[in-house]
Amino acid sequence: MLKALKKISLSLALSSFLSIPVYAEISVPDIGTAGIMGLTVQKEEQIGNYFMRAARSQLPIIVDPVLDEYVSSVGNKLLMHAKGVQFPFEFFIVNNLNLNASAFLGGKVQINTGLFVYSDTEDEFASVLAHEISHVTQRHIARFIESEVKKSNTSIASIVGAIALSIINPAVGMAALSTSLGLAQQSRINFTRDNESEADRIGIDLLNRAGFNPEGTTDMFRKLLNMQGNINPVFALLIDHPLSEVRIAEAENRIAQLKKRQDSTNPDFFMAKARIDVRYKKNDFADLKEVLKNDLKANRYYKNYALALTCFELNEFKEAKTYLNNLGANMQNNLFVVDLLTDIDLKEHAYQSAINRLNGLYKRMPRNKAVVVNLANAYIQSGQNKSAIRIIRDYLKRDRSYPLSYTLLTEAYLKSGNRCEALQSQGEDYALKANYNRAIGSYNEALNVCRNNLTVEIIKARVSELIEQRAFDAELNKS
């Protein structure tokens, strides 16, 4: 799907849906003063949304609906067995080959591409997500912030902003964090180590209850033990205490009390790993193809899907389909396979073939972003813009935080000649990435285009909300 998307003009903006506003309601919490205590769940979720806006604007986030659905499926499988889940989680992938993942307030979990690269099994991959989920459900970061506010005159806003900056820009953020907090104090070290021990314990139990092999935890711990120098220092200070043989032994003792499990054999993990290796690393595709063909030890799902992706990059579409067929007849409705078949169809202008295949899946999975985005893109490429608008608007009733939805919606409205709606959709796309000047500019331009009085009033209200949200973000960014 991503290879088929076309760039959209940035000179636009759009009118509200009237019955279905394209934006989420905003309630900005008052967290700016040093005297505020008690970081409520609502405030934590709102601060998490701030972090996501900042992350989208500054981190190399991979917007790949198939990978996004995969990490969400693993995360949600774990969350079904977790206790203390108080808000929806959001898992996102950053193009960074360091072996790392991190949790932030409000259930925002960042996953580096390096976690795919270094994980040999889905159990190892899931063990890291289980650990990060446990930090959130136990409210470790929220409790840390509250603890720091009690010990000093530092405001919640300053600490939150410094932590967020440390995740997004470690070099600058660590200086801000060190200025705000005396992180070397033994009481703080003990506090975070207790949290880490709790996350280890709960994460292992969560992994086991969700049906994964808990030994994935210790397998991953040993990899991390050999790579500690590559870990973002903010995580070592705030959450992770250094990995040691003692910590690994404690995890092994806990796992020994659990029922033995086999490693997960989910094909999606191996295809996700292949997708990262082929599409999100710098590759000479001709050389990569030969390496893959000669690799006799690779998992068959990994090898065939990686070869199919590589052949696609080389415009060898017939051969790409052969490798996809090698995955088996039962895999032809798999999202990884369907996504690549759609890319091939669109390259060959076989639009109706792609639409027919995706429509069958859409009837079963209308909430799946990979299906919706691929089908909407196929509709747009074939000139069926109204159909694209219909399914994207329906998707936005349930999920208003996926930027690619607004990108496609803007394109569909533009191509159908509806500049009023296109400008509003573009404004939301900008707002999700904290680009408030452009977002407000798009909405203001929409005021000059839209003629419906109710639409005009909705746009004015949205501009006021964006101005308020910009001020809220700026307060946190001061640190």
Image: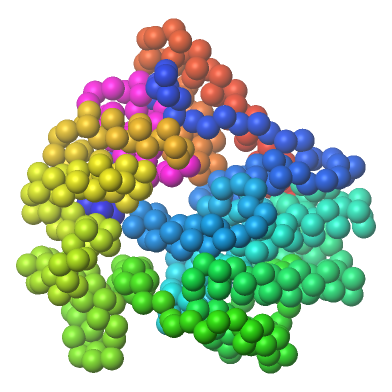
Q: Is residue 406 magenta?
A: yes
Q: Position of residue 472 (x, y in %)?
A: 68, 37
In the figure, 186 relative to 291: above or below?
A: above
Q: Is residue 70 visible?
A: yes
Name the magenta segment's main secondary structure. Answer: helix
Would residue 403 be found to the left or right of residue 247 on screen? left
Q: Is residue 298 magenta?
A: no
Q: Residue furthest front?
A: 259
Residue shown at 75%/64% (left/top)?
175
Q: Which residues are magenta?
A: 401-425
In the figure, 82 relative to 432: above or below?
A: below
Would residue 374 be found to the left or right of residue 317 on screen? right
Q: Position of residue 280 (x, y in %)?
A: 36, 68
In the figure, 206 relative to 9: above or below?
A: below
Q: Position of residue 395 (x, y in %)?
A: 37, 37
Question: In this view of the protein, which residue sits in the foreground, 96 or 294?
Answer: 294
Would residue 268 be found to the left or right of residue 417 on screen? right
Q: Quadrant of residue 277?
A: bottom left
Residue shown at 12%/54% (left/top)?
345
